[in-house]
Image (cartoon, grey):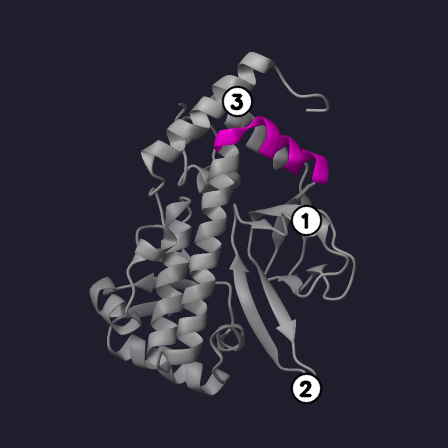
Amino acid sequence: MANANERAWNPLVAKLSQFAPLSNKDIGVLETLCLPEERFGAGAHIVTEGEAPRSAFVVTRGTACRYRLMPDGRRQILTILIPGDLCDLHGFLLHATDHSVVTVGPTRIAAIGREAVINIVTNHPRIGAALWWSTLQEEAMLRERIVALGRRSARGRVAYLLCELVWRQRAIGIAEDHAVRMPFTQTDLADLLGLTPVHTNRVLQGFRRDELITLDRRRLTLLDLERLHAISGLTPDYLKLNTTPPEVLRYFDGLERDRAALGPLEGA
């Protein structure tokens, strides 16, 4: 299998390589999926709740978030989308979306059509396995979000989110050790964590005083990971990085060999 680091960095390759070693052919397929790019400015809506779903897409640069808007105007941010994250891969099954997606700063995406999705699942078993494992990661993150909102203190919620942002960006190679770009305002963080902006600010200021973090010019650095882990009650294990069982990979390798022997399916 090829080492994804030997080629030009690609966010989708970087993400899916966490879950399965990819062949040169697999990498070429994923690189093609990321072209061409669409560019959006800050605050642009890529998906609007209630409308017919657009094609699936992958974030290639920048940051976006899924959210729901309450009848009284309050917002709940559901998930954060960073480079390499796929959005609404199965959206073509729906008549209308149940959430919106908005950019957080300048962002680029690449649309992925239904035919491309079906082709990947049908003809590239190892990519399919990586996508399944990526879905497991997304589900695990949603479970942690529910636990955080329902049971963690304000300090625990903020510590959990800051750690997750660094862990996820470090996994795809866009973090410098324990430092990442922080595009979110305190209002964004509050909408993520079910807190008020004032309470969020109070917690961040406390973390600064305790020398747990620095946050300067939209650059977040975690200074004391051990203490932040203790406050959040988490380690990166729930992100399921590099944990695909060897027997699963062997199974999909067998499917790939069988597929190669038969030749590409019609329409692939």
234 sits left or right of 220 in the view: left
Residue at the image point whose x is 46% and y is 87% from the top: 198
Residue at the image point whose x is 63% and y is 18% from the top: 264
Residue at the image point whose x is 51% and y is 63% from the top: 183
Magenta stretch prevailing secondary structure: helix
Residue 7: x percent and y percent? 45, 27
Residue at the image point whose x is 41% and y is 40% from the top: 19
- Check disc 3 and report the residue beneath it: 25
Residue 215 lies in the magenta-colored region: no
- Check disc 2 and report the residue beneath it: 72
Mark with earlier residue (2, 3): 3
In 3D space, how far apart are the residues under numbered discs 2 and 3 (Cα atoms)? 50 Å
Mark with earlier residue (3, 1): 3
Residue type marked 2: Asp
In 3D space, how far apart are the residues under numbered discs 3 and 1 (Cα atoms)? 27 Å
The residue range painted magenta reads 113-126
Q: Is residue 202 above or below residue 44?
A: below
- Check disc 1 and report the residue beneath it: 39
Residue type marked 1: Arg
Which structural element holds mark 1? Answer: strand
Question: Which quadrant of the structure image shows residue 223?
Answer: bottom left
